[in-house]
Image: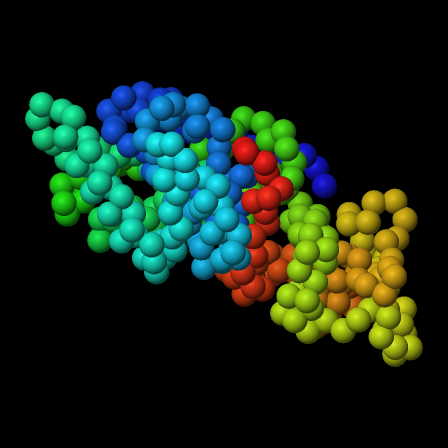
Amino acid sequence: MDKINWYPGHMKKTRELIQSNMKMVDLVIEVIDSRIPVASRNPVISELIGSKPEIIVLNKKDLSDKAETDAWIRKLTAGNVTAIPCDCESGAGTSRLMEELSKANEKRNSTKKWDRPLRMMIVGVPNVGKSSLINRLTRRKAAKTGDRPGVTKGKQWMTLENGMQLLDTPGILWPNIEDQEHGRHLAYCGSIKDEIYDISDLCLEFLKFMLKEHREMLYGRYKLDPPAASEEQEEEDSIWGTDDTSGLCGDGVTPVSENGEYTPLGAMEEIARKRGFIMPGKRIDYERCARTVLDEFRSGLIGRITLEHSQEHGDD
């Protein structure tokens, strides 16, 4: 799979916007994806926040493994950083967030000569759920939402019912994604536009992960039978073949199964057959299959999956 790099001009402007407005706010709310707590934390944002108090919202908790999310909450909560799990679509967890904001407001005013409402900034990578959170906090559709990155285009100041002021900013990625695993994770979750990379190749990488970490979940969702099933299956394989996989397999043909288990390509082809993603000439529609699998992961239909495990990331 090709290296993922994406840094449109508007993201450079977003960095400058965050930097110039940081001195105006008392607290920063960083929204991250609970399925990828490392990949969805932009190191550029951490630099810009500096020593300001921070609340990390692990959004989409309904899509991630609960035990893993709990472990990440314990790991990320330290010093002047508080971590809270949320589902911004349903509003779960936002009452706890409001409690923390009220505490921060009281603390801020206890150290100042005059009282004023708390000012906060919401930051995060694209498509992580910032706008959904804002709409929950303001209790109105104040910010545009969408399932594609890049919906928010400029800064927006809003006032909550309790008078607190909130600054929304567009999603910001970093110039070069050096860790390509992080790049893939962002792409799996939709934080990088699907047009940036070959979606069939991306799906093969995702299926590789699923076959290693969550095979039963994958088999269950797509009703996959063991690949070494029967002579009938072998005959079917010979009929369908893998002659249209030059963009997927590289040099030569990748077997559909190894050691009694599917290869990523084999799983993709079987999913396509099960779902009827077949084009004229009995050719498999790899792109349609890839979009379906990734969309179903992103919406939680495959199951609650955390791509990054807390114990594998030391003290980062």
* Res 34 visible: yes
Residue at 77% from the left image edge and 49% from the top image edge: 248
224, 75: nearer the viewer: 75
In the picture, which quadrant includes the C terminus?
top right
| Position of residue 212 measured from the top left corner of the image (x, y, whole percent) | 72, 55
- What is the quadrant of residue 226 in the picture? bottom right
- What is the quadrant of residue 171 in the picture? top left
Looking at the image, is 80 positioned above or below residue 231? above
Q: Is residue 186 left or right of residue 119?
A: right
Residue at 90% from the left image edge and 49% from the top image edge: 252
82, 274: nearer the viewer: 82
Residue at 9% from the left image edge and 23% from the top image edge: 113
- What is the quadrant of residue 198 in the picture? top right
Looking at the image, is 239 positioned above or below residue 124? below
308, 23: nearer the viewer: 308
* Res 145 visible: no
Looking at the image, is 11 positioned above or below residue 158? above
| Position of residue 11 measured from the top left corner of the image (x, y, whole percent) | 44, 29
220, 316: nearer the viewer: 316
Q: Is residue 271 left or right of residue 95?
A: right
| Position of residue 211 measured from the top left corner of the image (x, y, whole percent) | 72, 58
